[in-house]
Amino acid sequence: MELDRFVDEVEQVRSALGLEQDNFVLYGQSWGGILAMEYALRYQQHLRGLVISNMMSSAPAYNAYAQEVLMPEMDQAALAEIQSLEASGNTEGARYMELLNEQHYVHHVLRMPVADWPDPVQRAFAHINPVIYVSMQGPSELGISGVPSSPTGSAPTSCSRSKCRPS
């Protein structure tokens, strides 16, 4: 993955818009949170603030969250099948996506049956770039293959996450 390229693109947009430390707060949601953290590590002198939403900067912390919170809420037979497919590298088939949809996405991405997802959501999922997504996240949200280290610097940073599973 060319994360540096995406960081450079954010910088090009910031520069073209004439944003500086007095008026530039960068917001990163999910994968954008990783991008925003990487941007802040390289260009914090341009940031007034940084907002990270629904993304952890620690792969071990995220993997623990997946193990302790996400996976126990899933149907354990389905989880075993997901893990088997991941272990065998068979994550591009329809069955794998079907399992993720019913076990994770309808609880944590868009809380309605996949068949009812609006057309823009269906199109977005149909056009996810796996080269970017899988190299950052892994084949699913049930574990991270690698993320940048926690940002350090002087820009004020706010982090938030939501728990979307209804009780």
Image (tube, rainbow, N blue to C red):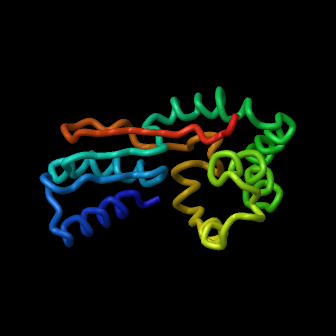
Residue 147 lies left or right of residue 23; in this view the side is right
Q: Position of residue 71 (x, y in %)?
A: 71, 34
Q: Position of residue 16 (x, y in %)?
A: 20, 72
Depicted 52 relative to depicted 97: above or below: above
| Rendering quarter of residue 64 | top right
Residue 93 lies left or right of residue 63; in this view the side is right
| Rendering quarter of residue 2 | bottom left
Residue in view at x 78 percent, y 54 percent: 96
Depicted 164 relative to depicted 97: above or below: above
Quadrant in which the C terminus appears: top right
| Rendering quarter of residue 124 | bottom right
Depicted 120 relative to depicted 87: above or below: below
Residue 123 lies left or right of residue 39; in this view the side is right
The one nearer the camera, 150 or 65, is 65
Residue in view at x 35 percent, y 51 percent: 36
Depicted 164 relative to depicted 139: above or below: above
Residue 53 lies left or right of residue 154; in this view the side is right
Residue with the most extreme front position: 167
Residue in view at x 77 percent, y 37 percent: 74
Q: Position of residue 128 (x, y in %)?
A: 59, 66
Number of numbered callouts drawn:
0
Residue in view at x 38 percent, y 53 percent: 35
Q: Position of residue 51 (x, y in %)?
A: 34, 46
